[in-house]
Amino acid sequence: MRHIRQLEDQSVYILREAYKHFDNLGMLWSMGKDSTVLLWLARKAFFGHVPFPLLHVDTSYKIPAMIEYRDRLAREWRLNLVVGQNKKALAEEMNHERGRVECCTALKTNGLKLLLEEKGYTGIILGVRADEESTRAKERYFSPRDKNNDWDFRDQPPELWDQFKTSFPPGTHIRIHPLLDWTEINIWEYIKLENIPFMDLYLDRGDGTRYRSLGCAPCTFPIKSTASTVDEIIEELRATNVAERAGRAQDEGRGMEVLRKDGYM
Amino acid sequence: MATCKTETSAAVDIRDRMNIVIVGSVDHGKSTLLGRLYADTGTLPEGKIEKIQAICKQQGKEFEYAFLFDAFLEEQQQGVTIDTARTFFQWAGRQYIIIDAPGHKEFLKNMVSGAARAEAALLLIDALEGVRDQSKRHGLLLSMLGVKQVTVVVNKMDLVDYRQDTFALIEKEYRAFLSQLDVTPQFVIPASAKRGDNIATPSPHMAWHTGPTVLESLAQFSSESEKGEQPLRFPLQDVYKFDARRILTGRITSGRLKVGDQVIFSPSNKSAVVQTLEAFNVEPPPTQALAGQSVGITLDEQIFVERGEVLSHESSLPLVSTTFRANLFWLGRRPLEMDKLYLVRLATHEVECRVAAIHRIVDADNLSLDQQQTNAVVKRNEVADVTIQAKAPLAFDLYSDLETTGRFVLVDEYDVSGGGIITEMVADREETLRVEARQRDFAWVQGDVTLADRAKHYGHRAALVLLIGPDTTGKTFLAKKVESMLVAEGRHVYMLDPENLRRGLDADLQDEDARETIRRYGEVARLLIDTGVLLISTTNSFNPSTGLRAGLPADQVVEAIRTLVHPAPVLTVYMSQETTLSPIEADLSFTGPEDFTRTTHDVLAALKQKGILAETIGNQPVFQFSI
Ligand SMILES: Nc1nc2c(ncn2[C@@H]2O[C@H](COP(=O)(O)OP(=O)(O)OP(=O)(O)O)[C@@H](O)[C@H]2O)c(=O)[nH]1
Ligand SMILES: [Mg+2]
């Protein structure tokens, strides 16, 4: 498990750098396996404490069990939970039938944008991984976003060794990505190693299906699987050729590229 | 095309992990080689090849393996990699991140960002084009970035009819180049990424090649590091006080740290014993930690230490100076200029600095030629031999001794804009005094009352306020007022006039002994500061006009004193009649003050702002901790 500890050391270092340099810092938490591992790493980095708020951009379409899980951990781990929502778009009945990219843009990208504006966060920590899809593969650990939240991938600043971009002009913010080097398998290996509580939607609970990634209910689908323990998940992932986000509708065509240039997670 | 799993691929337990970067000149086939490697080992996700086929067809192109990782529309349209991509590859028990770097010189900053994350590199050379400018520049940068393991791939052998003599010429030329950098390639492999020769399977067209395929060569890179056996370096990242524990955190960059170790902090010269290693969800708690680990420690006593200091054992201390010589590569939008202010970041230490000299620009094409030109600037993408001078002393190592504490970056405005490796420590003017102060501090015998106890008791940190400026500007008058006002508040303050040492401690000295006079004053100040006192002093005695006939300029006086009382904070106050420019960058400046009550308040406010004075007595002053 040495390779997992190496990943952990790097992520902890990044989290501590973020905490040192950003006065107004928040961490996105979607209750999925990745951002929950990220949350656990924060508890590692800060010795059982989480010294910044956890932000949940609530699309209102999440699976209800996720909200229960969120509130339970928030209580047990004494988290400062901040929930944001694009109420206007929801009032105008935004949903995935209007188009998936449109829906994601309104409820997630713009939901996040609104939360950033309201709270003035200058640094936000996200659990994206480089192996998820090909635009994330090109991210920096510390990635600047301009006034409009846009990502200028054509001109990313240099990132040398463990020296990250921690200063930025007013009005802009930095996205911090401590999990870039982790694979989906590494996430599960770590969950097992540290015994991190996770949602049982990831396991087969008897009907021969499980969720491989959790998003909004209408746009994520369970996969056929009989994995009912973490070990079985790891075994299954080692043997598969199917990408994790294969079940996600936004990833079709250039969907993610368009979304992420615009400030999507 | 293989899209099904082959037997040796994934389903093996992982022994270790490694980051590898693929570099080389533009269009030499880096992305293609990577795509081919994945395709021929059956490690691509299902449907990926079909997706790329569709894109190529739509653009009316032949199938391009490069598109697997050149994901952006702009990259595919122009057939060029713009930014690095992390790709994940698992083979024979090792988890690799293979970083595909761009070769175009326009995107050198991205290549450097990718290579800086790598432990080993594949360097590609196009067999038809041969060794290009960027082939050499990338080789040079790899060696500066600390990537010592390199395998060279001579690609596109299909375009030269797989001829061994063409290959041999390129191999010879590039080996000669690398040898000047002290790099020996592990292998030089002839290949064709497009046709799959010597990528995952041996080529039938090049039976003359007896070495490994590219895939086989990966396993030959070593991920074992000897860093654990090197001297301990632990750059302090932050200090936390979330609960009863005061935890010092950071990442060990070399060596090992054990509970019970006596450690020295540089450049503050403080020392303490490691009491515990702290960790969350680890039972029993660890008793030692190694290079690479992010750790937290508590100490046996509460000493003031700040981010940027480097912990080591006393038997192998880092170097300390304001000045060093380095090889630097510059990636900034604007050229690097002399006399402009930058930030130097070395491990976790960040200090303002200037470039004191640009000795030469290194020509990647002709490394050995020592051109004696003087340069005013270092342009983007150039490599130069420079001297950097920081505004405060830094703890560091030579790159040849310890990698991580031997390198640094320069920050220009908001961006990391260049990086470098330290080749030489330059002794600055304070070197002699600094060595004296270090030795004195290491041997210092202390009672049970710590500086922190004293600070709490008196409501301020021990510090020095130095009043400088021409004669008869009211410095002594102000010193007296500050002293009275603070004592009235109940603080522990003392006005020390250097004149008081002249007939006593300095009775054996001549007027010519300016340096010694200042040294003795500095040692007295250091002693008093250790009692927890806030010391106020004028510097008239050291001025040529009023005191010593052979006095020193004010900036040198201040620097010498600062070195001797280091790391106690020094507040400098410049006073003058007219608007003469201060010879030093003073914290406060007053011109012909008339209202000394206001001036006194200004000094007090500055002391509070610097975190020296607590708001009220009995309160802990504000230290530079995270919370
Ligand atoms: N004939 C032949 N063509 C090749 C070979 N390898 C790559 N190419 C072609 O060379 C062109 C450039 O290949 P890329 O893989 O994009 O080159 P690159 O080194 O990644 O380029 P940058 O990332 O932009 O620096 C493409 O059209 C490839 O098809 C080879 O072995 N033989
Ligand atoms: Mg490329």
Image (cartoon, grey):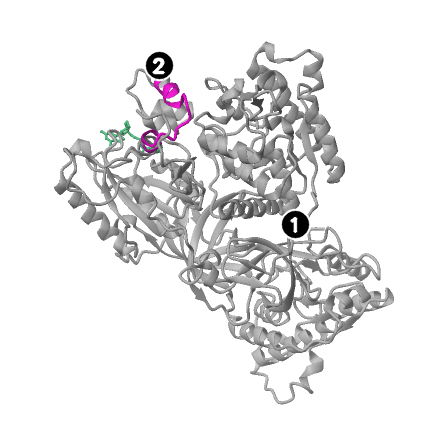
Q: Residue at x 64, y 26 (%)?
A: A113
**Residues drawn in magenta:** B37-53
Check the picture and name the quadrant holding the N terminus of chain B: top left
Question: Disc 1 on helix, strand or loop?
Answer: loop
Chain of the residue under the numbered disc 2 shown in the image: B
Task: Answer few, some or many: residues within 10 Å of disc 1's Cα (few below 14, many 20 plus, some between 14 and 19).
Answer: some
Q: Which residue is mark 1?
A: B280
In the picture, measured across the screen, residue B550 lies left or right of residue A158, that is right
Residue B426 placement (x, y as % from top left): 45, 66
State the CA–CA distance, disc 1 to disc 2.
Answer: 53 Å
Above or below for A127 versus B461: above
Where ligand 2 lies, by quadrant? Answer: top left
Q: Which residue is mark 2?
A: B58
Residue B356 placement (x, y as % from top left): 45, 58
- Which is nearer the eye, B491 or A246? A246
Q: Quadrant of residue B59?
A: top left
